[in-house]
Image: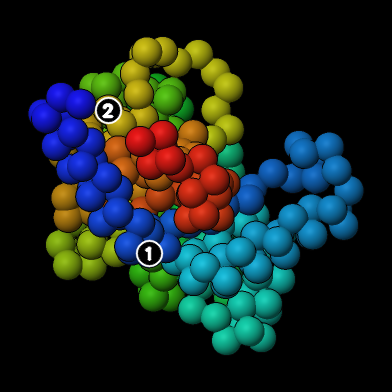
Amino acid sequence: MNTKLLIERMMRLMEIEDIKSDISNYLDSTYLKTSEQAGISDEETKNNVMSLLDDALNHNMKLVMVRPEQVELAREVIDQRNGNTLVGTVIDFPFGNGSTSDKVNEAKRAINMGVDEIDYVTDYKSFKAGNIEKFIRDIVDGTRVGMDAGKVVKWIIESEALTNQEIQDITQLIRDVVVNEFGEIPASSVFVKTSTGFFNGEKPNPEKTKEEDVIIMSQNAGPLRVKASGGIYTIDDLNKMVKAGASRIGTSAAKEIIRGDKDVIKDY
Protein backbone atom coordinates (compact mmCIF):
# COMPACT_ATOMS: atom_id res chain seq x y z
CA MET A 1 0.00 0.00 0.00
CA ASN A 2 1.14 3.54 -0.71
CA THR A 3 2.93 4.82 2.43
CA LYS A 4 1.22 8.21 2.30
CA LEU A 5 -2.20 6.59 1.99
CA LEU A 6 -1.44 4.25 4.88
CA ILE A 7 -0.41 7.18 7.11
CA GLU A 8 -3.57 9.11 6.17
CA ARG A 9 -5.75 6.12 7.05
CA MET A 10 -3.96 5.58 10.36
CA MET A 11 -4.43 9.25 11.27
CA ARG A 12 -8.11 9.01 10.33
CA LEU A 13 -8.54 5.97 12.53
CA MET A 14 -6.89 7.81 15.43
CA GLU A 15 -9.20 10.80 14.98
CA ILE A 16 -12.25 8.54 14.98
CA GLU A 17 -11.01 6.70 18.08
CA ASP A 18 -10.52 10.04 19.87
CA ILE A 19 -14.18 10.85 19.21
CA LYS A 20 -15.32 7.35 20.16
CA SER A 21 -13.56 7.51 23.52
CA ASP A 22 -15.81 10.38 24.60
CA ILE A 23 -18.66 9.89 22.17
CA SER A 24 -21.51 9.64 24.68
CA ASN A 25 -20.90 13.23 25.80
CA TYR A 26 -21.74 14.48 22.32
CA LEU A 27 -24.96 12.56 21.81
CA ASP A 28 -28.51 13.83 22.16
CA SER A 29 -30.36 10.59 21.42
CA THR A 30 -33.54 11.64 19.68
CA TYR A 31 -37.06 10.36 19.06
CA LEU A 32 -39.44 13.08 17.89
CA LYS A 33 -41.99 11.33 15.67
CA THR A 34 -45.61 11.46 16.78
CA SER A 35 -47.67 8.30 16.59
CA GLU A 36 -49.42 9.69 13.53
CA GLN A 37 -46.15 10.52 11.77
CA ALA A 38 -44.77 7.07 12.45
CA GLY A 39 -48.03 5.32 11.58
CA ILE A 40 -48.12 3.48 14.89
CA SER A 41 -50.20 3.42 18.08
CA ASP A 42 -49.56 5.59 21.13
CA GLU A 43 -48.53 2.45 23.01
CA GLU A 44 -45.94 1.66 20.35
CA THR A 45 -44.66 5.24 20.54
CA LYS A 46 -44.28 4.86 24.32
CA ASN A 47 -42.38 1.60 23.75
CA ASN A 48 -40.05 3.38 21.33
CA VAL A 49 -39.39 6.11 23.89
CA MET A 50 -38.72 3.48 26.56
CA SER A 51 -36.25 1.78 24.23
CA LEU A 52 -34.58 5.15 23.64
CA LEU A 53 -34.30 5.66 27.39
CA ASP A 54 -32.87 2.18 27.95
CA ASP A 55 -30.22 2.71 25.30
CA ALA A 56 -29.31 6.16 26.61
CA LEU A 57 -28.97 4.95 30.19
CA ASN A 58 -27.08 1.80 29.25
CA HIS A 59 -24.57 3.83 27.25
CA ASN A 60 -24.53 6.86 29.57
CA MET A 61 -25.51 9.23 26.77
CA LYS A 62 -25.55 12.96 27.36
CA LEU A 63 -29.26 13.50 26.75
CA VAL A 64 -32.51 12.11 25.38
CA MET A 65 -34.51 14.46 23.18
CA VAL A 66 -38.26 13.75 23.20
CA ARG A 67 -41.52 15.53 22.49
CA PRO A 68 -43.01 17.58 25.37
CA GLU A 69 -45.68 14.95 26.02
CA GLN A 70 -42.92 12.41 26.76
CA VAL A 71 -40.90 14.56 29.17
CA GLU A 72 -42.58 13.31 32.35
CA LEU A 73 -42.03 9.68 31.34
CA ALA A 74 -38.37 10.32 30.54
CA ARG A 75 -37.80 12.20 33.79
CA GLU A 76 -39.46 9.46 35.84
CA VAL A 77 -37.52 6.60 34.23
CA ILE A 78 -34.14 8.32 34.48
CA ASP A 79 -34.70 9.33 38.10
CA GLN A 80 -35.87 5.84 39.07
CA ARG A 81 -32.68 4.39 37.63
CA ASN A 82 -30.45 7.10 39.13
CA GLY A 83 -29.20 7.93 35.67
CA ASN A 84 -27.07 10.89 34.65
CA THR A 85 -28.70 11.28 31.24
CA LEU A 86 -30.43 14.62 30.78
CA VAL A 87 -33.92 15.20 29.37
CA GLY A 88 -34.42 17.61 26.51
CA THR A 89 -37.47 18.62 24.52
CA VAL A 90 -38.46 20.71 21.51
CA ILE A 91 -40.61 23.83 21.66
CA ASP A 92 -42.83 25.24 18.89
CA PHE A 93 -41.79 22.23 16.86
CA PRO A 94 -41.28 21.84 13.96
CA PHE A 95 -42.37 25.11 12.33
CA GLY A 96 -41.35 27.75 14.90
CA ASN A 97 -44.06 30.20 13.84
CA GLY A 98 -46.05 30.26 17.07
CA SER A 99 -46.44 33.42 19.11
CA THR A 100 -43.81 34.41 21.63
CA SER A 101 -46.24 33.74 24.49
CA ASP A 102 -47.00 30.27 23.13
CA LYS A 103 -43.29 29.48 22.99
CA VAL A 104 -42.77 30.72 26.53
CA ASN A 105 -45.77 28.89 27.98
CA GLU A 106 -44.81 25.62 26.31
CA ALA A 107 -41.30 25.95 27.70
CA LYS A 108 -42.61 26.67 31.19
CA ARG A 109 -44.75 23.54 31.10
CA ALA A 110 -41.74 21.46 30.07
CA ILE A 111 -39.66 22.98 32.86
CA ASN A 112 -42.37 22.12 35.38
CA MET A 113 -42.28 18.54 34.13
CA GLY A 114 -38.54 18.32 34.82
CA VAL A 115 -36.86 19.02 31.49
CA ASP A 116 -33.15 19.90 31.55
CA GLU A 117 -32.65 21.42 28.10
CA ILE A 118 -34.97 23.32 25.77
CA ASP A 119 -34.61 23.30 21.99
CA TYR A 120 -36.77 26.06 20.54
CA VAL A 121 -37.48 26.34 16.83
CA THR A 122 -36.76 29.91 15.76
CA ASP A 123 -39.33 31.77 13.72
CA TYR A 124 -36.97 31.61 10.78
CA LYS A 125 -39.76 32.54 8.36
CA SER A 126 -40.23 35.84 10.18
CA PHE A 127 -36.49 36.35 9.97
CA LYS A 128 -36.50 35.69 6.22
CA ALA A 129 -39.47 38.05 5.78
CA GLY A 130 -37.71 40.84 7.67
CA ASN A 131 -39.93 40.71 10.76
CA ILE A 132 -36.92 41.03 13.01
CA GLU A 133 -38.80 42.50 15.98
CA LYS A 134 -40.87 39.36 16.48
CA PHE A 135 -37.85 37.14 15.91
CA ILE A 136 -35.81 38.98 18.54
CA ARG A 137 -38.68 38.96 21.04
CA ASP A 138 -38.84 35.16 20.75
CA ILE A 139 -35.10 34.86 21.39
CA VAL A 140 -35.08 37.20 24.39
CA ASP A 141 -38.18 35.87 26.15
CA GLY A 142 -37.50 32.21 25.35
CA THR A 143 -33.89 32.38 26.47
CA ARG A 144 -34.83 34.21 29.67
CA VAL A 145 -37.32 31.49 30.65
CA GLY A 146 -34.63 28.86 30.25
CA MET A 147 -31.88 30.81 31.97
CA ASP A 148 -34.08 31.77 34.91
CA ALA A 149 -34.73 28.07 35.48
CA GLY A 150 -31.08 27.13 35.02
CA LYS A 151 -31.70 25.27 31.76
CA VAL A 152 -29.59 25.00 28.64
CA VAL A 153 -31.32 26.69 25.69
CA LYS A 154 -30.87 25.87 22.01
CA TRP A 155 -32.26 27.75 19.02
CA ILE A 156 -32.96 25.72 15.87
CA ILE A 157 -32.45 27.89 12.81
CA GLU A 158 -33.61 25.31 10.19
CA SER A 159 -30.46 25.75 8.13
CA GLU A 160 -31.81 23.74 5.19
CA ALA A 161 -34.34 26.53 4.59
CA LEU A 162 -31.66 29.23 4.53
CA THR A 163 -28.96 30.42 2.19
CA ASN A 164 -25.37 30.53 3.41
CA GLN A 165 -25.68 34.28 3.94
CA GLU A 166 -28.91 33.83 5.89
CA ILE A 167 -27.28 31.17 8.08
CA GLN A 168 -24.48 33.60 8.86
CA ASP A 169 -26.86 36.50 9.50
CA ILE A 170 -29.32 34.57 11.68
CA THR A 171 -26.49 33.06 13.73
CA GLN A 172 -24.92 36.47 14.29
CA LEU A 173 -28.27 37.97 15.23
CA ILE A 174 -29.02 35.28 17.81
CA ARG A 175 -25.49 35.64 19.18
CA ASP A 176 -25.74 39.42 19.48
CA VAL A 177 -29.20 39.34 21.06
CA VAL A 178 -28.20 36.74 23.66
CA VAL A 179 -24.85 38.36 24.53
CA ASN A 180 -26.30 41.88 24.73
CA GLU A 181 -29.28 40.79 26.80
CA PHE A 182 -27.67 38.26 29.16
CA GLY A 183 -23.91 38.73 29.00
CA GLU A 184 -21.08 36.80 27.41
CA ILE A 185 -20.57 34.21 30.14
CA PRO A 186 -24.25 33.17 30.47
CA ALA A 187 -24.42 33.07 26.66
CA SER A 188 -22.10 30.06 26.67
CA SER A 189 -25.03 27.95 27.90
CA VAL A 190 -26.97 28.79 24.73
CA PHE A 191 -26.67 26.93 21.43
CA VAL A 192 -27.62 27.50 17.85
CA LYS A 193 -28.78 24.26 16.23
CA THR A 194 -28.90 23.34 12.56
CA SER A 195 -32.28 21.78 11.90
CA THR A 196 -35.43 20.04 13.05
CA GLY A 197 -34.99 17.11 10.69
CA PHE A 198 -38.58 17.69 9.56
CA PHE A 199 -38.06 20.34 6.89
CA ASN A 200 -39.67 19.34 3.58
CA GLY A 201 -39.59 22.64 1.70
CA GLU A 202 -37.44 23.95 -1.09
CA LYS A 203 -33.76 24.22 -0.23
CA PRO A 204 -31.99 27.40 -1.38
CA ASN A 205 -28.70 25.48 -1.65
CA PRO A 206 -29.66 21.88 -2.52
CA GLU A 207 -26.04 20.76 -2.92
CA LYS A 208 -24.91 22.21 0.41
CA THR A 209 -23.85 19.78 3.13
CA LYS A 210 -24.70 19.88 6.81
CA GLU A 211 -20.98 20.19 7.48
CA GLU A 212 -20.90 23.50 5.62
CA ASP A 213 -23.82 24.78 7.71
CA VAL A 214 -22.00 23.89 10.92
CA ILE A 215 -18.82 25.60 9.77
CA ILE A 216 -20.69 28.82 9.01
CA MET A 217 -22.53 28.67 12.33
CA SER A 218 -19.44 27.90 14.40
CA GLN A 219 -17.55 30.76 12.79
CA ASN A 220 -20.28 33.22 13.77
CA ALA A 221 -21.80 31.87 17.00
CA GLY A 222 -19.15 32.37 19.67
CA PRO A 223 -19.54 32.41 22.66
CA LEU A 224 -22.70 30.45 21.82
CA ARG A 225 -22.12 26.82 20.92
CA VAL A 226 -23.36 24.75 17.98
CA LYS A 227 -25.48 21.62 17.87
CA ALA A 228 -25.69 19.63 14.63
CA SER A 229 -28.77 17.52 13.92
CA GLY A 230 -30.50 15.76 11.07
CA GLY A 231 -28.96 13.07 8.85
CA ILE A 232 -26.18 12.07 11.26
CA TYR A 233 -26.03 8.27 11.32
CA THR A 234 -22.39 7.13 11.55
CA ILE A 235 -19.23 7.86 13.49
CA ASP A 236 -17.88 9.42 10.31
CA ASP A 237 -20.87 11.78 10.14
CA LEU A 238 -20.36 12.69 13.79
CA ASN A 239 -16.63 13.18 13.33
CA LYS A 240 -17.24 15.62 10.46
CA MET A 241 -19.71 17.64 12.53
CA VAL A 242 -17.38 17.85 15.52
CA LYS A 243 -14.45 18.89 13.35
CA ALA A 244 -16.69 21.53 11.74
CA GLY A 245 -17.37 23.02 15.18
CA ALA A 246 -20.34 21.21 16.73
CA SER A 247 -20.12 20.34 20.40
CA ARG A 248 -23.42 18.44 20.53
CA ILE A 249 -24.97 16.00 18.07
CA GLY A 250 -28.67 15.23 17.74
CA THR A 251 -29.32 11.85 16.14
CA SER A 252 -31.87 9.06 16.00
CA ALA A 253 -29.00 6.60 15.51
CA ALA A 254 -27.09 7.20 18.75
CA LYS A 255 -26.97 3.54 19.76
CA GLU A 256 -25.89 2.49 16.29
CA ILE A 257 -23.11 5.07 16.28
CA ILE A 258 -21.83 3.92 19.67
CA ARG A 259 -22.02 0.23 18.76
CA GLY A 260 -20.44 0.85 15.37
CA ASP A 261 -23.25 -0.82 13.47
CA LYS A 262 -22.76 1.62 10.60
CA ASP A 263 -19.27 2.68 11.61
CA VAL A 264 -17.03 3.65 8.68
CA ILE A 265 -14.07 2.31 10.65
CA LYS A 266 -15.09 -1.23 9.64
CA ASP A 267 -14.40 -0.36 5.99
CA TYR A 268 -10.68 0.11 6.62
Q: Label 1 is placed on what type of residue?
A: Asn
Local packing at callout 1 (Cα closer than 10 Å; few below 14, some 14-19, many 20+) is: some
| Residue at figure coordinates x 16%, y 50% from the top left | 222
Q: Quarter holding the C terminus?
A: top left
**Residue at position x 30%, y 38% from top?**
240
Are there few (<14), some (14-19), or many (20+) residues within 10 Å of tag 2?
A: some
Say which quarter of the image contains residue 17.
Answer: bottom left
Q: How far across and how far down the image is residue 196, in percent? A: 51, 39
Q: Nearer the viewer, residue 264 or 153?
A: 264
Who's the residue at 71% across and 71% down the image? 73
CA gap, disc 2 to disc 1? Answer: 23 Å
- Residue 91 image offset from top left, x and y in percent: 55, 52
Residue at 69% from the left image edge and 44% from the top image edge: 33
Viewer can see residue 146: no
Q: Is residue 125 visible?
A: yes
Q: Secondary structure at mark 2?
A: helix
Asked whether 41 or 201 is in front, the reply is 41
| Amino acid at pointer 2 | Glu
| Left or right, residue 150 beside residue 247 | right
Q: Quickly name the residue at label 2.
A: 212
Residue 200 picture location, percent across and down: 58, 22
**Mark closer to the observer (2, 1):** 1
Q: Identify residue for label 1.
A: 25
Q: Secondary structure at mark 1?
A: helix
Does 218 appear above or below 144? above
The location of residue 247, given as percent across then percent down, is 29, 53
- Of labels 2 and 1, earlier in sequence is 1
Q: Pick the residue in front: 3 or 54.
A: 3
